[in-house]
Structure formats: structure tokens, C-alpha cells
Image (cartoon, coloured by chain):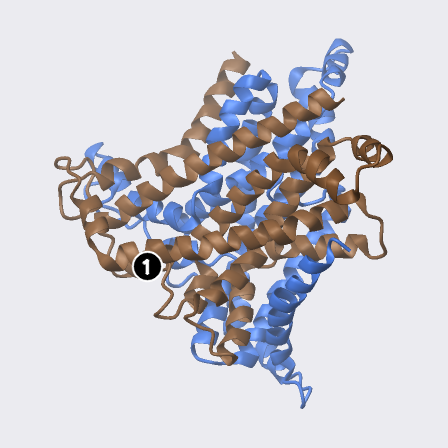
Chain colours: A brown, B blue
Amino acid sequence: MARFGHSTLAILILLFLLLPLIIVLPLSLSSGSYLSFPPPGFSLRWYRSFFDSRSWTDAALMSVQVALPVTLLSILLGTPAAIGLARGAFIGKRMVQALVLSPVIVPGIIVAIGAYFVYARFGLVGHPVALVLAHTCLAVPFVVINVGAGLHAVDPQLERAALSLGASPLGTFRQITLPLIAPGILAGAVFAFITSFDELLVALFLSGSAAVTLPRRMFDEIRFDIDPTIAAVSTLLIITTTGLMLLAELLRRRIQQRRILGT
Amino acid sequence: MLVLPLLVFLLVFFVYPVGAMLLRSIEPGTWSLAAYRDLLASGVFWRVMEITLEIALIVTVCCLLLAYPLALWLARLPQAVANFALILVLVPFWTSVLVRSYAWMALLERHGIVNNLLVGLGLFDTPVKLLNTRLAVCLAMMHVLLPFMVLPIYASLRSLDWRLVRAAQSLGATPWGALRQVVLPLSRPGIGAGVTLVFTLAIGFYITPVLVGASSDVMISVLINDEVGQLAWPSASAMAAVLLALVLLVTAGLARLTGARAVPGTI
């Protein structure tokens, strides 16, 4: 009986997490001209209004244009750093570790106005490059964490064995380490992409009028009125994030399986 | 040496901008603490801090109360089922805060779903003001932050040796007693990490309070944003420094108290 009550409670809490997301779908499919539930009828008109509007599609494109270089930069900087942190021994390692993770802990508004304070002086506000640089700081910890988890599962003795059998350090990395940590890199890449793609606070300060991203466009729209176009965009975003999330989750499972095989 | 490129990148594009902005509060050159003196003398600042801490505290306590039973339930499920159920926690976790705040706006607005339901059930004759209230901002923030509490608690309960619970029960502990005296103390690192994450993230919240909060419930991030909008840099950066100090203090303090290490994004 107690167990049954506990399950009911847990499922209710899960519903609290999920229902607000699920409810956006019928709203986006409404044929009415403002948000109403239940919708008076179903249509795809709000999706059409999204895809027909240059300002919406441009904003979506800008978000991708920013998120892709952020992802690439995060992998290039984060992967070696994760290896250095996992395998190397150097003075101040804990400080470096704390610094690498700190962009996630420092409140978003502080990161945003700090970036604005400096980039405004260089005339970079409204330039996608400013967004890429600031977003990379926020995204790179996720690559370091995920690659770190992947490395944790790799037995360092495999690397030592390769080295002792005559492989060069670079060859060892390419043939032994890299294939083993590839799922971790990919999972980190997915999280880095989502982090940048969804980021609003930095975008509010740095996107100006020339580099308007999708979250920025949504925020401006929501403050004036909440027509169902936002519901359509939200649904598309939920579907995209869920898809990417499941991908990252599958990759994470592969890491875990490796760990079991390794031990 | 592999860490060097990232280290340099973060020093240039993260530490330098934030540091330069924070230094603005003491006006380099004059080295004056006037901005901080004004801040401490400002009634608005204290009122905003009070509101911010109050909301953060309510949200943290409510998140803990909801997260613990959920995490406990997840931890007792067979691994395969738990993995699936975890995805249900991770999907909202990774959905943008903006989208989730918007969903709460749609739920709580005057002719929104909740009001239609309340009126439809005959509980109220006319729609109630739900959006832009303290209740709305607490609900929406709880929704956004709950996964940050569930995931670390789940992780600590998963790694717990459940034979200890069976041992306690075979020695005469009631299920409730075993929970209180064995499970709860052993999951303290998870609780500590969750509480730290949720509380520190909550005091820095901006998007949700702006969209669903009451206009009188100004939180510190919103005030900082307003100050920057008026180009009042010294006061904005002094507030940013106080907020950052608070976040770091809470993180370090709670870590010491609970032995928890808050590493967000990991399970």
C-alpha cells in the first residue's frame, strides 16, 4: 500500500515536469487566433506563419550559425583540456578545474553584462563573433565533463601498452584514446550545441539588431503578445532538444557499456 | 599543457570581461567604495535582496520536498525502467528555460488552461489572476530547477548500499525509521549538491521572473539588468559583485557542510 502511494506520488511529480511541455503542442496546432484551450479546431497555420516570416527563419538560421562554431570550438578546446585534467599532474590543477567549470556556476546576468561591458568597447555588439566567443565559455564545461567521464572509463594501461609497443604519443591518441572517448566527445558536442542554441541572457545584450537569435526573437515577441506562433516555435524547439537529448543519452549508454566491459 | 589553450581562452573571454566589469564598481583610478556605500544605504537594494532570497528559499525547499520522493522511487526501480524514467526528467532539463516559462504563461494567463479549468469546475465564478504573481514565479522556477535537485539525489541513492537498509529492518527498524536513520543520512552529499545548485541558480534567475513574476517582485538579476539599461555601471557592477560573492559563499559553505561537490551537468 505504501509502495503504491509512493508510485502515485512519483508519477504525479513526473507529470508536473512533463505536462507544461506537452500542453504546448495542442496550443500550437490551434486554428484560433489567440491561445485558447481546448483549441477551437486544428490547423498548421502557426507553423506556416513561422516558416513564412523572414524575421523568424533568419533568427533560427542565426542561432544555428552561432551554435555550430560554438560546438566546434568547444570540442577543440574542451577535449584536450579534459585529457590534460584526467591524465596530467600539475600544480594548481584543482584551481584550473574550478575555473573550467565556473561559467556554469556564475549567474547568467553577470556573464552577460561582463561580455557586454567589454565587447561594446570593441564595437562587437550585434556581431555573431561576440555571441560565439561568449557562448563557448558557457558551453565548453559540458564537453570537459562528458569527455572526462569517457576518459574515466578508459583504462590508462591500454595507452601505456600502445606506447611500450612502439606507438608514438600521437598515434596512441589517434588509435587508442580517441576511438574510446568518441562517444563522450559527441555527447559533449550535443550539450554544447543545445547550450548555445537555447541561450538567451547573453543574446539579449550582445545580439544587437544584427545578430538576433531565435531565443532573442521569441523573448521580444512574448513580451508584447503571446500569439500561437510562439507555441509553434516552442514545439519545434522541444522536439529538436528531445531528439538531440536522446542522441546524447544513447552515446552516454555506450560509454557506460564500455566501462562494464573494461572492468 | 593540454589544458593551456582552454585556460587562455577562458582567461581572455570569461575572466577578463567579468573581472573588468566587476572592477568598474570601485572605479579604477579613484579606488572608491562609494558604489558599495550607496548600495548598502539603498532601500531598494535591500528590499530586492530580501525578495530574491525569499523566492530562492521557497523554491529550494519545495524542490527538495518534490525531488526526494521522486529520486527515491527512481532509485528503487530496475535499472532499465529507471533509465527510461530518467529521460522523462532529462527532457524538461534540457528544454530551454524560455520555452518552459512560456508554457507557464500559457497555463496561468487570464483565459489560460488553469483558469478555464477552475471556472469550468465551478471553483471560481470568474478567472483568477494567476500570471505575474509570487505563486506563478515560484511554480515556474520550481519546474525549471526540479531536475537539478532530482539528478544528484538520484545519483547518491543509486550508489547507496541497499543491504544496509535490509540490515536495519531485520534489526527491527520500521521502513520509515530506516529511511530516516539510514537512507537520508547516506544521501546527504546528493541533497547537498542539489540544494546548492538550486539555491545558487535561483538567486541568479532572470528570464522566469521577468516573464511570469509579479512586477513588484523584482529579483536581483532584474535590478542589475535595469541598472545596466540606465548605464549606471558602478551600481550595476557593485550588485553583480554582491550576487557573485553570495553564490560563491553559498557554494563553498554548503559543500563544507554536506561534503557535496556541485558539478552541474553530470549525473
Instruction: Give the x, y percent position of residue B239.
Output: 57, 71
Q: Is residue A138 left or right of residue A220?
A: right
Quadrant of res B246: bottom right
Q: Residue at x 64, y 68 (%)?
A: B12
Image quarter of residue A118? bottom right
Q: Is residue B132 visible?
A: no
Instruction: Please tell me whether residue B68 is drawn above or below residue B148 in the rendered image.
Output: above
Q: Is residue A56 left or right of residue B64?
A: left
Q: Which residue is mark 1?
A: A217
- Compared with B159, B30 (above or below) is below
Image x and y of residue B2, in percent: 74, 53
Residue A241, image x and y in percent? 42, 40
Of A184 and B23, nearer the camera is A184
Q: Residue furthest bottom?
A: B30
Residue at 26 percent across and 47 percent down: it is B128
Please state which of residues B106 and A164 is positioned toward the viewer in this rendering: A164
A170 or B8: nearer the eye? A170
Q: Which of the chains bears the disc numbered 1?
A: A
Q: Residue at x 67, y 38 (%)?
A: A178
Residue A100 locus on image (x, y percent): 68, 55
Task: Determine whether, in the image, residue A181 is placed left or right of residue B210.
Answer: right
On-image quarter of the C terminus of chain B = top right
Q: From what the image shows, is residue B26 above or below residue B146?
A: below
Query: Which amino acid does the dot numbered 1 rest on?
Result: Arg
Q: Is residue B52 left or right of residue A212?
A: right
Quadrant in which the N terminus of chain B is drawn? bottom right
